[in-house]
Image (spheres, grey):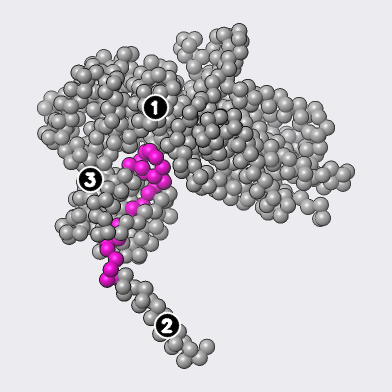
């Protein structure tokens, strides 16, 4: 492998990881507030189609991203209304959201399956840093959304573990009853977290359709939303680990293809199961250690809360 | 309820049923129903079949009544769909994807008067006939174009799942290229999915990174062509004409004309001459084509070579897997002058010489 090939490989890994990082980070914040939203795939698809439609129609990719975020938030609000206000079962509602998003995005996306984007979003290389061999191209020659997704990890990490608002959010996720007793607006905080999750999933979807593939086709994300969900568990709800997990996933994919192209016999069917296998493995490991779960997994995850109870 | 009331109800019900059924039986043309795996969208497998169905509508007009059912998974769910279509009185029911085979066959046994057609399958019953098109013939012609067009002598192939159909297309693409440029070899990446634009793109990028400058794919999206366009190399469309997804990168599209078969089969059913002999049509029946050739890029020599082989294929006297053909290890697989029989083509599980890497088993 020469330098340019290694650079291409690293680049390919990072770019494949970005939609997972965005959607995964949104879900992580949602779950930290104690809400399990299995609708990530549906929200990503709605973001992907809305963003693509708006970008293709107006010629402004940035409007597309704004629209995608809005679409993700609308989907998340539907989920929030059902599970937070009406206290419907979160698992069932999340699955319904994914099924709805898959079908509805296909329906509204029909006229756009042949539409080409009039513009592309160009990379914005950072002088000097982008010249670093191998990693320079991968990390410092991204689009603005690419940089944003890395920056968001710092922001969310700071928010969750260094800010008062983040402490409130986590306390709501641990014990909504106690949080309510000390006067925190549990539902408002959960609504906020769910909306952030929707916004990130929408943005991740639009990144996929507008920047990465320049393409809209039905079921475009092909399960990326589920991988993002798995990565949150894999990361044991820590943003830093989530980023590493997403990059690792992108790298495994890139390496697998690279190995095939240079003729190394790899069991491709097995490699395709790796992210899920890794998640199961992590689940097994953290289940063996109750302290680890107590430390990171939100204790009230998936349980509805009512202030009247 | 009184007996009287019951009787009245029965009379009303009978009248309703009669009014619904009788005129229908007299006026309605025979129903032809198509079951799709996906939704036609704008490119790919289901779209290619939809184009064929539109040809049927154009050909037969109101002589048949066409029904479509989209997004039917290759699971036990499909059996319910086939049964429902048969119960509704359709005379011909077409399953357009491999995975329907067992479910469709099961329903076929319960409806002996209905003709069931099944794409790419291998089972048979008196009222259950399989059909397929020889896409590999188109892949061979694409290979000729690739052999002339490549500068690096490395071709790329984005492959879906390792089944004989896909291996056949990889081999044919390589044979075509080598027939005009013996230095060519083909790199293959399997993505283990028929449709995942993200993986298709990543695979295409990797192939291009490894020096491949003419790509072909046996997957369902236009992502490979789109990636080739972005990286300024060449690629082909597959299943349907994909030129618009990358006009500069597009060298041509390997297209299946399912309508040719649908027209013929439905005509036979109407004439009561249909039987369930398996059908595998190619260039001789104009069921496959390499179309929309990019004459601005493809040299005149290459165009002539394609035209010559196209003629040979159309004549039906020559086919792609005619010897001498060696496998990767250099062993003679098909001797000079011999042609691999269809039965062997249908279980092809070896790469020809010139394909890099090992076939996943």
Dot 3 or dot 2: first in sequence order is 2
Quadrant of residue B177 in the image? Answer: top left
B74 above or below B178? below
Estimate the spatial distance between the alpha carbons at disc 3 and disc 2, rounded to whole Å. 47 Å
Is residue B350 visible in the rendered image? The answer is: no
Label 2 sits on a secondary structure element that is helix
Task: Give the vertical position of B306 relative to B69 (above or below).
Answer: above
x and y percentages locating residue A66 in the rendered image: 62, 34
Give the mark nearest the N terminus, 2 or 1: 2
- Graded by Cα atoms within 10 Å as few (under 14), some (14 to 19) or many (20 or more), the crowding at tag 2 reads few
Residue A147 coordinates in the image, percent (x, y): 63, 22
Residue shown at 34%/73% (left/top)? B21
Q: Which is closer to the viewer, label 3 or label 1?
A: 1
Q: Nearer the viewer, residue B16 or A185?
A: B16
Q: Nearer the viewer, residue B219 or B56?
A: B56
Name the side, left or right, on which A295 lies relative to B340.
Answer: right
Residue tagged 2: B12
Report which residue position mark 1 lands on. B246
Is residue A84 positioned above or below A193 on the image? Answer: below
Provide the residue span drawn in magenta.
Answer: B25-48
Name the residue at 40% across, 85% down: B11
- Residue drawn at point x = 46 percent, y = 12 percent: A1
Q: Which mark is residue B260?
A: 3
Instruction: Tell which subunit mark 3 falls on.
Output: B
Which quarter of the rendering shows the C terminus of chain A? bottom right
Q: Chain of mark 2?
A: B
Decide if residue B140 is in sight here: yes
Q: Label 1 marks which chain's residue?
A: B
């Amino acid at each position: 492998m020469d330098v340019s090939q290694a650079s291409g490989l690293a680049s390919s890994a990072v770019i494949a990881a970005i939609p997972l990082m965005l959607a995964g980070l949104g879900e992580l914040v949602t779950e930290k507030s104690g809400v399990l939203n299995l609708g990530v795939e549906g929200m990503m698809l709605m973001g992907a189609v809305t963003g693509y439609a708006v970008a293709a129609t107006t010629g402004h990719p940035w409007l597309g991203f704004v629209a995608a975020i809005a679409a993700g938030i609308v989907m998340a609000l539907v989920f929030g209304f059902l599970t937070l206000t009406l206290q419907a079962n979160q698992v069932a509602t999340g699955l319904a959201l994914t099924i709805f998003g898959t079908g509805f995005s296909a329906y509204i996306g029909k006229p756009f399956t042949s539409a080409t984007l009039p513009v592309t979003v160009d990379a914005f290389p950072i002088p000097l840093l982008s010249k670093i061999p191998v990693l320079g191209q991968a990390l410092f020659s991204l689009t603005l959304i690419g940089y944003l997704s890395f920056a968001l990890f710092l922001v969310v990490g700071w928010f969750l573990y260094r800010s008062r608002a983040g402490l409130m959010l986590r306390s709501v996720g641990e014990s909504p009853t106690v949080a309510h007793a000390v006067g925190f607006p549990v539902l408002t905080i959960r609504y906020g977290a769910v909306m952030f999750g929707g916004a990130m999933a929408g943005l991740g979807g639009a990144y996929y359709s507008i920047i990465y593939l320049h393409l809209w086709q039905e079921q475009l994300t092909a399960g990326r939303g589920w991988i993002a969900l798995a990565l949150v568990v894999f990361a044991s709800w820590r943003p830093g680990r989530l980023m590493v997990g997403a990059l690792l996933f992108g790298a495994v994919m890139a390496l697998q293809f690279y190995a095939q192209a240079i003729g190394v016999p790899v069991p491709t069917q097995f490699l395709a199961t790796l992210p899920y296998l890794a998640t199961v493995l992590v689940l097994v490991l953290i289940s063996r250690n109750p302290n680890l779960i107590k430390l990171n997994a939100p204790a009230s995850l998936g349980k509805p809360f009512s202030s009247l109870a | 309820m009184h007996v009287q009331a019951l009787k009245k109800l029965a009379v009303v019900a009978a009248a309703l049923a009669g009014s619904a059924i009788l005129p229908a039986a007299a006026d309605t043309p025979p129903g032809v129903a198509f079951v799709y795996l996906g939704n036609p969208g704008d490119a790919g497998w289901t779209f290619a079949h939809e184009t064929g169905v539109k040809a049927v509508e154009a050909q037969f007009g109101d002589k048949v009544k066409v029904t479509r059912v989209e997004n039917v998974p290759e699971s036990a769910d499909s059996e319910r769909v086939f049964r429902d279509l048969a119960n509704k009185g359709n005379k011909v029911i077409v399953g357009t994807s491999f995975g329907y085979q067992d479910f469709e066959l099961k329903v076929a046994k319960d409806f002996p008067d209905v003709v069931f057609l099944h794409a790419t399958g291998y089972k048979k019953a008196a009222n259950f006939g399989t059909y397929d098109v020889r896409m590999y013939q188109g892949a061979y012609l694409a290979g000729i174009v690739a052999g002339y067009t490549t500068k690096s002598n490395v071709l790329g192939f984005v492959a879906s799942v390792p089944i004989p159909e896909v291996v056949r297309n990889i081999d044919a693409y390589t044979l075509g290229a080598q027939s005009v440029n013996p230095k060519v070899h083909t790199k293959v990446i399997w993505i283990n999915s028929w449709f995942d634009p993200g993986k298709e793109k990543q695979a295409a990028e990797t192939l291009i990174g490894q020096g491949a400058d003419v790509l072909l794919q046996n997957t369902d999206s236009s992502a490979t062509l789109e990636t080739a366009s972005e990286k300024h190399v060449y690629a082909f469309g597959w299943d349907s004409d994909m030129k618009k997804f990358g006009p500069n990168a597009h060298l041509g599209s390997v297209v299946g004309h399912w309508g040719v078969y649908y027209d013929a089969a439905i005509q036979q059913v109407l004439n009561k001459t249909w039987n369930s002999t398996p059908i595998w049509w190619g260039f001789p029946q104009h069921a496959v084509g390499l179309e929309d050739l990019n004459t601005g890029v493809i040299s005149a020599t290459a165009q002539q070579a394609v035209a010559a082989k196209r003629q040979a294929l159309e004549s039906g006297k020559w086919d792609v897997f005619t010897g001498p053909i060696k496998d990767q290890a250099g062993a003679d697989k098909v001797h000079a002058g011999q042609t691999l029989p269809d039965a062997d083509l249908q279980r092809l599980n070896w790469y020809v010489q010139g394909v890099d890497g090992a076939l996943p088993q």
